[in-house]
Amino acid sequence: MLSKLCVLGVVMCLVCVINAKKDKRYLVREVCNSSSFQCADKSCIPGTWYCDTDEDCPDGSDEARCPTDCSGENQFKCNNGNCITGVFKCDGDNDCGDRSDELNCPSG
Ligand SMILES: [Ca+2]
Ligand SMILES: [Ca+2]
């Protein structure tokens, strides 16, 4: 239900943002607002997708001027040195490869 609302672009929530992020078949049409990032082509993406190591703008402009040392606020540096999208931390999936993104997470 949440993902359906998400696809419609009506409601943004953390769960559906992560699902959309991991399944690019879901195209999230973000309404441009103060918390979103506007791509060079004027389309908008959720603000948490800015500089998260993954190109989300059609032209990749969201990743054009980002820290290369994984120090961005939307990035997470794994113990093994991999740099992953920040919203993938504590989402139940082993994205780092060494599970370090799933350590020290609130249980439940
Ligand atoms: Ca991005
Ligand atoms: Ca994860």
Image: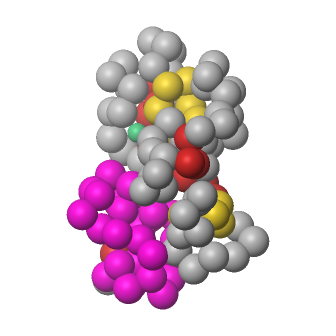
Above or below, 64 against 44 in this view is: above
Range of magenta residues: 4-29
Based on the displayed image, in which of its 4 quarters is residue 106 positioned?
Answer: top right
Q: Give x and y (percent) for residue 62.
A: 57, 48
Q: Give x and y (percent) for residue 14.
A: 51, 64
Query: Residue 89: in sight, yes or no?
Result: no
User: Which quarter shows the N terminus?
Assistant: bottom left
Residue at 36% x, 19% y: name it.
98
Above or below, 72 against 107 in this view is: above
Q: Point out the residue furthest to the left here.
A: 25
Query: Residue 96: in sight, yes or no?
Result: yes
Residue at 32% x, 52% y: name it.
22
Q: Point out the residue furthest to the top here.
A: 80
Quick check: 1 left or right of 78? left
User: Is 14 covered by the magenta stretch?
Assistant: yes
Based on the displayed image, in which of its 4 quarters is residue 88 positioned?
Answer: top left
Quick check: 34 left or right of 76? right
Q: Give x and y (percent) for residue 55.
A: 45, 45
User: Is 37 covered by the magenta stretch?
Assistant: no
Residue at 36% x, 62% y: name it.
20
